Amino acid sequence: MKVGIIGGGQLARMLALAGHPLGIETIVLDPAFDACAGAVTRQLRGAYDDRNQLKALADDVDVITYEFENVPEQALQSLADLASVYPSPNALATGRDRLREKTLLSMTLGIPTAPFAAVDSREELESAAADIGLPAVLKTRTLGYDGKGQYVLRGIEDIDAAWGQLGSVPLVLEGFVEFEREVSIIAVRSRNGEIRCYPLIENVHTDGILRLSHCRPGDPQQATAEDYIGRLLDSLGYVGVIALELFQADDRLLANEMAPRVHNSGHLTIEGAETSQFENHLRAICGLPLGQTTPVGYSAMLNLIGDLPDPAAVLAVPGAHFHAYGKAAREGRKVGHITVRAENTTELERRMENVRDTLST
Ligand code: AMP
């Protein structure tokens, strides 16, 4: 099997690495000369809407997937005319537009979310703020990631600044959730509709960027999260791995956003699950049997942002696994991650502490 991947970042790199032992060949399409997946698999260099490269990719592979939401819709649609694309262009179009996504989750599927409203003018912002109440979060409908394209309105005096910063594009205003914790559920759906879910993952974000994830086998919210993601997967006729990010507030789960792809919070499944999210995504889109999603021990992941620590110091901690993405250091950039695994949670926290110590020296 040959899989084409739109985008050549770290998610494509980890997909390619998961494909090797299965005999699945991957080819990535990315415009960058230093695309980090290019170091481990073949790369076609070209813009995501380069018709010739898209056609070359479609001709060369059995199935096409993508590693990010902002693939131009037209490009994916034209690929879908030439080859099998999973997850479907409809799933991508839903995941990339916060209004469409929240409308599907909340109105169609009855999954609780924060209150939200479309905002296309300053007047609409004022009336949405009055309806929803403040604090609230103003977000761009598309192209937002890692907390970019967001403005937290604490009071009506913030409306001018928020509109000045974001008002040139379609927006959505969401009620601010005073959450107790953030979690994600990652699941995979096969071509014939079988669904498998990973244990809930608890996440800590700083400045909108994921910093820390803990796998939580046996979490009391597991069944609710599985119910929500099952509804979402079935409604989209989805094939592949998906992530749903949720807030927990007052013992309720509120859906925040979906990612129609492998997800940063699922990196710990490489060492912390029977089958990683990357392998399961490939299995699903290639029509192979899905792998077990059962956890292996207890695991947690730390994102490495900006630059890499000394790998030798990290690897000296038992149970620590080091992943470098082959990217140049740059402030705010995800350049790698560390997964730590242990037999119990006490030992996991002790090892995490030891890993953190290596980062601060
Ligand atoms: P998002 O791009 O929607 O995933 O937002 C990035 C991060 O901003 C989330 O992981 C939360 O930490 C925070 N955030 C986003 N939306 C809300 C909200 N409605 N209420 C409170 N915090 C939020």
Image (cartoon, rainbow, N blue to C red):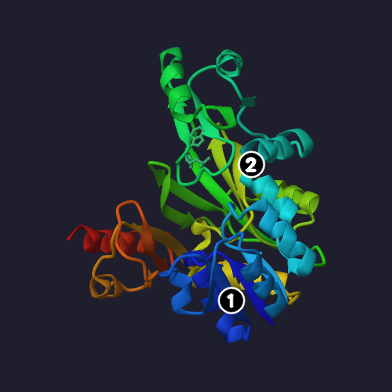
Q: Which residue is mark 1?
A: 27
SS at mark 2 in the image: loop
Left or right relative to 297: residue 314: left
Image coordinates for residue 160, horizontal then vertical, percent: 44, 17
The residue positioned farthest toward the front in the image shown: 52
Give the class, few, some or many, for how many residues have Cα within 10 Å of label 1's Cα (few <14, many ≥20): many
From mark 1 to mark 2, how far is it between C-alphas? 27 Å
56 or 195: nearer the viewer: 56
Give x and y (percent) for residue 273.
55, 69
Identify residue type, mark 2.
Asp
Q: Residue at x 25, y 75 (%)?
A: 312
Where residue 60 sits in the image (x, y, percent)? 68, 79
**Residue 121 placement: quadrant:** top right
Q: Residue at x 71, y 77 (%)?
A: 59
Q: Relative to residue 155, is residue 48 depicted above or below?
A: below
What residue is at 71 percent from the left and 39 percent from the top?
Answer: 105
Seen in the picture, residue 258 relative to 251 is either above or below; the reply is: below
